[in-house]
């Protein structure tokens, strides 16, 4: 079984995460995924041989549609998701506009936008497709995630390195998951 299939199986066998993926699928948004800690934390919990923790304080839903970039659309979608699933806090962002906030060139897709996220282990997302399969998007692959390696993405390895360092300090990941190794020093 390849690495992305292992991650897919892990998410599919987590009842809460699978239900949340279904809630997002029901929106029928183009190029839509749940990313970041939703996937990363589930994998890190599994590799630390402990029960899956809650998906987190906010579920990062990304999608891409250059014709619907009004932030109010994201707020409306958050409200729809909140009504479906009260147990989590939703953060919905159309990646077609996020390059402006981040000072990047326009993104080409939701997966392209993940190339501009801070850590390789965070730049991963999942979605539940119409055939009820779990698809994984990992523009940097999943090796760092599965090998418990913290590493900045290329965009954060030079000009934004201080942001990467601050995130590692503030997130406290190495306290929560002590087997993590920082390869971005």
Image (cartoon, rainbow, N blue to C red):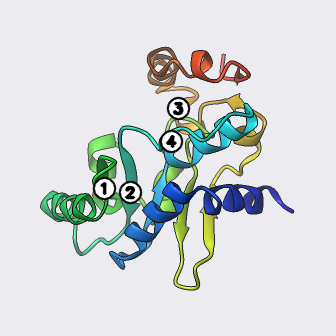
Which quarter of the figure is the C terminus placed in?
top right
Q: Residue at x 48, y 41 (%)?
A: 54
The numbered disc on residue 93 is 1
Few, some or many residues within 10 Å of mark 3 (<14, 14–19, 20+): many
Q: Which comes before the other along the chain, label 4 or label 2? A: 4
Furthest-left residue in this view: 72
- Of helix, strand and loop, which one carries label 4? helix
The numbered disc on residue 20 is none
Q: Is residue 90 above or below residue 165?
A: below
Residue depth check, mark 1 versus mark 4: number of the one nearer the observer = 4
Q: Which comes before the other along the chain, label 3 or label 4? A: 4
Q: CA distance from mark 2 to mark 3?
A: 22 Å
The numbered disc on residue 37 is 4
Residue identifier under label 2:
61
Q: CA distance from mark 4 to mark 2?
A: 11 Å
Residue depth check, mark 1 versus mark 3: number of the one nearer the observer = 1
Q: Residue at x 51, y 35 (%)?
A: 118
Q: Residue at x 75, y 41 (%)?
A: 146
Which percent across, then down, holds residue 21? 47, 64
Which quarter of the figure is the N terminus placed in?
bottom right
Q: Residue at x 47, y 18 (%)?
A: 162
**Is residue 98 shown left or right of residue 108?**
left
The numbered disc on residue 156 is 3
Mark 4 and 2 residues: CB-CB less than 8 Å, in contact?
Answer: no
Mark 1 and 4 residues: CB-CB less than 8 Å, in contact?
Answer: no
**Is residue 52 shown left or right of residue 34?**
right
Mark 1 and 2 residues: CB-CB less than 8 Å, in contact?
Answer: yes
- Of helix, strand and loop, which one carries label 2? strand
């Amino acid at each position: 079984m390849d690495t992305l299939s292992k991650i897919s199986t892990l998410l599919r066998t987590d009842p809460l995460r699978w239900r949340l993926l279904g809630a997002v699928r029901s929106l029928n948004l183009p190029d839509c995924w749940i990313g970041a800690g939703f996937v990363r934390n589930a994998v890190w919990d599994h590799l630390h041989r402990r029960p899956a923790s809650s998906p987190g304080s906010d579920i990062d839903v990304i999608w891409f549609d250059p014709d619907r970039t009004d932030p109010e659309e994201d707020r409306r979608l958050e409200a729809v998701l909140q009504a479906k699933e009260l147990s989590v806090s939703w953060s919905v962002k159309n990646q077609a506009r996020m390059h402006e906030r981040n000072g990047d060139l326009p993104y080409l897709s939701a997966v392209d936008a993940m190339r501009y996220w801070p850590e390789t282990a965070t730049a991963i997302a999942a979605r539940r497709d119409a055939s009820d399969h779990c698809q994984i998007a990992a523009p940097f692959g999943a090796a760092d995630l599965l090998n418990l390696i913290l590493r900045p993405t290329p965009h954060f390895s030079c000009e934004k390195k201080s942001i990467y360092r601050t995130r590692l300090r503030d997130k406290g990941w190495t306290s929560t998951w002590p087997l993590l190794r920082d390869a971005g020093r």
